[in-house]
Amino acid sequence: MDFLTWIKSECYDGSYIPHSFVHEGRIIANVSVTKTEMMIKGMEVNGIQIGTVMTHPLYRGQGLSRKLIESVMKEYSYAEFIYLLANDSVLEFYPKFGFVSSDEFIYFNESISSFEILGGKRRLCGGNPEDISILKDKLSKRNFQSKFFGVKGSVSVPLWHFLNTYTDAFHYISPLDCVAVYSILNDELQLYDIISESPLKAVDVIPYIIESGVKKIIYHFMPDDFDSCAVRGGKFVYDKMFYLGRNIRLPDELKYPAVYTA
């Protein structure tokens, strides 16, 4: 799936903004910016997520990514919170711009024997305009999933994941009028997000998505209000958060919501 299809499907809302160097008609380096609304320890914050940091192999070593990041940070210096997600290969790079790092952690619940199995869900299809419309509506009206660390605002990024990353994972639950983003791998329910206008809890949603044989729920967001039985597991090994905040301190042991990763 390319950017053109994403745009033609009317899944781009302008909140994702690429900043690029172009040479001979080809993008050779890019840094994207996504405008988000965030909940951090009960406080609503306007955020800027930096993502899609990449340079064509033939043009590396020229400081192009550095120049783009410096430009972005200058342009969006008004933002209350600027952040990005990166892996261990660039741990030395982002602190040069003043970013500090925070580990992410996975949360899980193994006390799930009491959940019954209910019907009432259906998988949303990226090729169906009606399903795209449903998802756009839910994303535009959604509440914060967590009071400690939640993200919303951008509709484009979750829709990108709907079309490209978690293509079979978005499900509409009609009795609750919400969207659950999940997959089941072996005996684990991987829950990526709950997209709802009204607050919901695990006891409300899990019966509609759990299947026989599931022994564990893995949360890819902070489930503080959603599931009081969830416990913190080990570090999330794929990403680390780097951030700049105006007198903002992140909660300990956070997990960035998977479907808002740009």
Image (cartoon, rainbow, N blue to C red):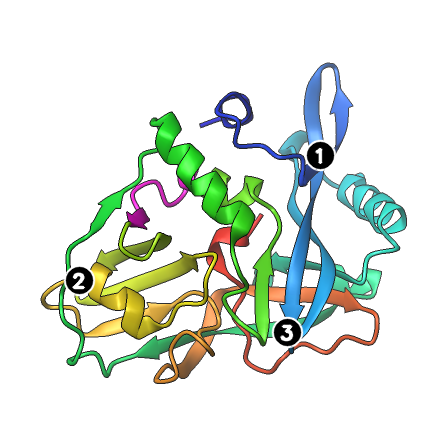
Tags 2 and 3 touching, CB below 8 Å: no
Work out which residue is located at the far left of the displayed protein and give it. 212
Find residue 247 and name its label. none
Tags 1 and 3 touching, CB below 8 Å: no
Looking at the picture, which amino acid does disc 2 mark?
A: Asn
Task: Name the side, left or right, on which 18 lies relative to 236.
Answer: right
Q: Residues within 10 Å of mark 2 (few under 14, many from 20)?
A: few
Tags 2 and 1 touching, CB below 8 Å: no
Disc 2 target residue:
186
Q: Who comes first in sequence, dot 2 or dot 1?
A: 1
Name the residue at 15% across, 80% down. 113
Looking at the picture, which amino acid does disc 3 mark?
A: Ser
Q: Residues within 10 Å of mark 3 (few under 14, many from 20)?
A: some
Of 147 and 141, nearer the camera is 141
* x and y percentages locating residue 69 in the rendered image: 79, 47
Disc 3 target residue:
102
Q: Is 258 located above or below residue 25 in the figure?
A: below
Disc 1 target residue:
29
* Comparing labels 2 and 1, the label whose residue is closer to the camera: 2
Q: Who comes first in sequence, dot 1 or dot 3?
A: 1
Badge 1 marks a residue whose secondary structure is strand
Q: Which residues are magenta?
A: 162-173
Badge 3 marks a residue whose secondary structure is strand
* x and y percentages locating residue 119 in the rendered image: 15, 55
Q: Is 29 located above or below residue 182 in the figure?
A: above
Name the residue at 30% across, 69% down. 204
Q: Is 67 located above or below residue 105 in the figure?
A: above
CA distance separating discs 2 and 1: 39 Å
Badge 2 marks a residue whose secondary structure is loop
